[in-house]
Every structure is written in C-alpha cells, then in structure tokens.
Image (cartoon, rainbow, N blue to C red):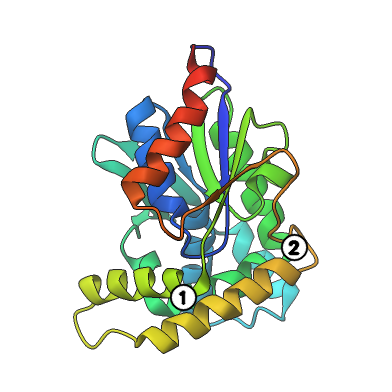
Amino acid sequence: MKAGLVIAIDGPAGSGKSTTARLVAQRLGLFHLDTGAMYRAVTLKIITSGIDIRNRQALERLLKKTKVELRWTKKGTRVYLDGKDVTEAIRKPEVSERVSEVSAIGCVRAAMVKEQRRLAKGKNVVCEGRDIGSVVFPFAQLKVFLDCALEERARRRQKELAGAAQGSPPSIEQVRRNLAKRDFIDSRRRLSPLHRVRDAVLVDTTHLTIEEQVGVVCSLAKPLLK
C-alpha cells in the first residue's frame, strides 16, 4: 500500500470520532493521528500555566515553548506534553470544558495544523476532529462526517465519565450543557468552523453501536487499501 493515505473523520463532540478513528486504524493497520488530543494537550498547558488566553502575546510565547507529541505504541497512541505523558490528564473535565474555546484561537490552530501535517507526512493515517476534511487535509482520499443527536451524545459521554470518575461524575444535564456549548463554539467560530464538506460521507451514529460505526467506516476505506 502506497504511503500517503488519509482518512478524515469529522463531527461534533461526543459523536464517537476518537473511538471510531482509533479502532479503524487498528483494524486497517494505519496510524491514528489523534488531533483532538493535541488540542487538549495545549489546553492543559494553558490551564496549568494560568495565562489569560485573551493575552495573545503571552499565548504565542507559551506556544513557542510548548511541544506536543504523539507516540504510537502497541497499546495505542500516547500523548506527550513537553516530554511528559499526559494521555489520561487531557481527558479530565476541566480540559473538556475549555478545549473548544482554546481550539478556536487562530495561533493555536495554525501551530497544531502545521504539526498535524508534519506527523502525517509519509504515513497512512486515520484522523478525526472538526476541520480535518475541510482545512487540515482537504485532499484526503476518504472524508467521513459522524453525526449524532445531542441527547444520545450526552448519555454516552456521561456514561464514559461515570466509569472513569473517582468521585461524583457530572450529571447528564451538565454534560448535555457542555456539549451544547461546544457545538455552538465549534460551528460558529470564525476560523475552521465545524461543518460537513460536500464530499464527506454522512454517517448518523445515533442508533449505531461503536462496532457498527467502525464497520461502516472500514467498509468505506477498504477499497482504498488495494
């Protein structure tokens, strides 16, 4: 298989993009380029640094001193921030609450898009996000847009958080509000808003299991692997 294949999966928060992309990559023997994790890592850095994101000069200085890496292992993709493994830390609620806001900032997007293209160069990758098929890899050989009803996304996300929480997990209403806020920010931001490009295949995952939606994407991708 010739290197350079890109499978781009876009969609709103909680639609199953990350899990689908990871499992598709595993089944097809491709690299999983977790772009969402990269934005989460930058968000974590901003939170821990305590800087005001409205101070663009301070933010740009911080980005210059920030290194986000993805390392592919047999157990999956690990995310490193300035040399430290933050794979679990970037999934904390406080990061989820701010990642859309951070992702909408121009200098952050420019830095991450440049790094994403560098990581994908010479590889066959599956990647997911909000603007993968529209901005990051507009010439991707396969573009998929995963959609899902808000209530179902909230139910899935709350169940996920409840399983991972050490204390009391957020209520389903809190999760729903957070997802609705992220939808609003992602779809209305000036730079690289979330939208389905014309050549993306729409897959509604509201009534699909993860296994079923992975199967749909794999079936779309297999002809490209010959």
* Vertical side of 84 occupied by 56: above or below: below
Q: Which is nearer the eye, 163 or 89? A: 163
Residue 106 circle label: 2
- Mark 1 Cα within 10 Å, few/some/many (few <14, many 20+)? some
Q: Position of residue 180 (x, y in %)?
A: 57, 78
Disc 2 marks which amino acid?
Answer: Gly
Q: Where is residue 148 in the image (x, y as percent from the top left)?
A: 51, 62
The answer to whether residue 107 is left or right of residue 149 is right
The answer to whether residue 72 is left or right of residue 220 is left
Q: Mark 1 or 2 closer to N-term?
A: 2
Q: Which is nearer the eye, 99 or 173? A: 173
Image point (47%, 37%), residue name: 217
Pointer 1 with pointer 2, Cβ within 8 A: no
* Vertical side of 128 occupied by 84: above or below: below
Q: Which of marks 1 and 2 is in front?
A: 1
Q: Mark 1 points at which residue?
A: 151
Image point (41%, 58%), residue name: 207
Q: Position of residue 141 (x, y in %)?
A: 63, 27
Report the residue that reaches farthest toward the front: 207
Q: Quadrant of residue 23?
A: top left
The answer to whether residue 121 is left or right of residue 195 is left
Q: Where is residue 127 in the image (x, y as percent from the top left)?
A: 52, 42
